[in-house]
Amino acid sequence: MADEPENPDAAADRLEVALERIANLAAARPAPVHPPIPDSDLSVAEIAERLDSLIGRLRAALGKPD
């Protein structure tokens, strides 16, 4: 597989699945013991919205409709 050119649609799909898995893990983990950095104090909904936006931009760049 390393020698074959990668299908952009398959790569975008794998990236989307990975980002969704990361978002789900982040939502399920307990809060950190140390105080959060003020700039990174985002809600799960805000993180999910940003990831959705990123996925949309990647799909558009690859020419894949939503």
Image (cartoon, grey):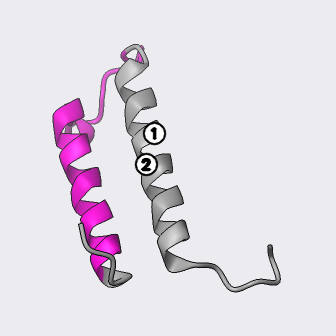
Count residues near mark 1 (Cα–Cα under 10 Å), then give few for <14, some for 14-19, many for 20+.
some
Nearest to the observer: residue 65 or residue 24: 65
Secondary structure beneath dot 2 equals helix
Question: Magenta includes 46?
Answer: yes
* Residue nearest the observer in this picture, 33 or 10: 10
Image position, residue 34 (x, y; %): 39, 19
Q: Is residue 5 above or below residue 31?
A: below
Q: Would residue 39 be seen by someone viewing this image from the given angle? A: no
Picture layout, residue 13 above or below residue 59: above
Q: Which mark is residue 7?
A: none
**Is residue 13 toward the left or the right of residue 62 in the image?**
right
Could you tell me residue 40's position as x and y percent? 26, 41
Residue 8, image x, y percentages = 51, 78
Quadrant where the image shows the N terminus: bottom right
Mark 2 touches mark 1? (CB < 8 Å): yes
Please, is residue 35 above or below residue 26 in the view? above
Quadrant assignment, res 25: top left
Q: Residue at x 24, y 32 (%)?
A: 44
At 48% across and 73% down in the image, what residue appears?
Answer: 9
Question: What residue sits right under mark 2 in the picture?
Answer: 19
Q: What residue type is disc 1 on? A: Ile
- Give the SS element for disc 1: helix
Q: In this picture, which residue range is highlighted in magenta?
A: 31-60
**Dot 2 amino acid type:** Leu
Quarter residue 62 falls in = bottom left
- Quadrant into which the C terminus falls: bottom left
Residue at mark 2 to residue at mark 1: CA–CA distance: 5 Å
**Residue at the (26%, 72%) spot, across then down:** 57
Checking the image for residue 22, the label placed there is 1
